[in-house]
Image (cartoon, grey):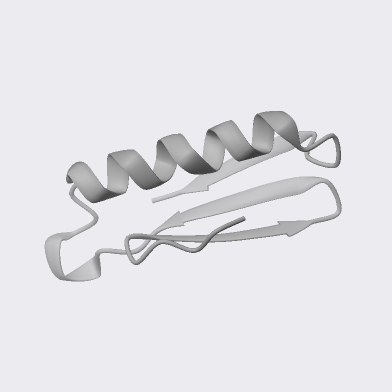
Amino acid sequence: MPEHITLLTVTTENILSISLNRPESYNAVNEAMKEGLNDALKQAEKDEGVWWIALHV
């Protein structure tokens, strides 16, 4: 998974964990975060090793 400044991603034991990473704005969603989240979800959809997705805000 590509890392985005506004998102942190890690896959462990078939679980993709996506953490919002904009603490200075209380994780308010901006355009970069929306694009990054969309990219991460599209990549996860293609990855047969990802069974679950956890979103941490």
The residue depicted at 66 percent of the width and 37 percent of the height is 44
Q: Quadrant of residue 11?
A: bottom right
Res 29 visible? no
| Residue drawn at (75%, 47%) of the image | 15
Rendered location of residue 19, percent (x, y): 46, 57
Give the x, y percent position of residue 56. 47, 51
Q: Name the image quarter holding residue 21.
A: bottom left
* Residue 14 picture location, percent across and down: 83, 46
Residue positioned 24% across, 68% down in the render: 23
Q: Is residue 12 above or below residue 29?
A: below
Q: Residue furthest bottom?
A: 24
Q: How many labels does the image show?
A: 0
Image position of 37 (left or right of 18): left
Residue 20 percent location from the top left of the image: 38, 56
The answer, for residue 21, to whether it is visible in the render is yes
48 or 28: nearer the viewer: 48
Q: Is residue 33 left or right of residue 12?
A: left
